[in-house]
Image: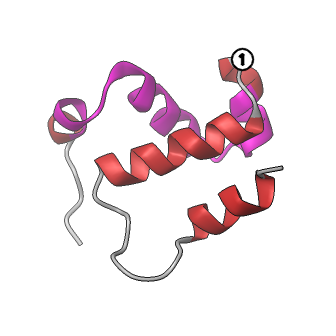
Amino acid sequence: MHRLTDAELRSRLMGAELQLLRLIEGDLPNKSIASHLGISDGEVTSRMATLHQALGLTPSNGPTWLQRQMAQTQP
């Protein structure tokens, strides 16, 4: 698996996505990330899905862990 450099990350991601990635790197739970960003837990999950797509981490078959989490948090 190719590890992205900081320059590659900056070229692929917008500011908000980089901020989210940094919080994820800090191993914070979704609730803490949501609180830090002033958004809901569901929005964190949604943004993580977008981040996964931007980084090419979305597999082509079957639901991802993130997709399963999103399904559980939706009303």
Residue 7, x across and y down, in percent: 16, 34
Task: Decide which of 26, 40 is in the foreground and name it.
Answer: 40
**Quarter location, residue 33:** top right
Residue hosting label 1? 38
Residue 28 is one of the magenta-drawn residues: yes
Q: Secondary structure at mark 1?
A: loop
Task: Tell me where residue 45 appears, x and y as whole percent.
Answer: 63, 46
Give amino acid for label 1: Gly
Q: Is residue 13 magenta?
A: yes
Stretch of the chain drawn in magenta:
9-34
Q: Is 54 on the left or on the right of 51, as rendered?
A: left
Q: Quadrant of residue 71?
A: bottom right
Q: Is residue 60 left or right of residue 19?
A: left
Q: Position of residue 11 (x, y in %)?
A: 16, 32
Q: Up-down: is 11 above or below 72?
A: above
Horizontally, is 16 left or right of 27 in the view? left
Q: Main secondary structure of the magenta part?
A: helix
Residue found at x 65% / y 35%:
43
Residue at 30%, 51% (x, y): give it. 55
Q: Quadrant of residue 38?
A: top right
On screen, residue 50 above or below 53: above
Number of numbered discs visible in the structure rendering: 1
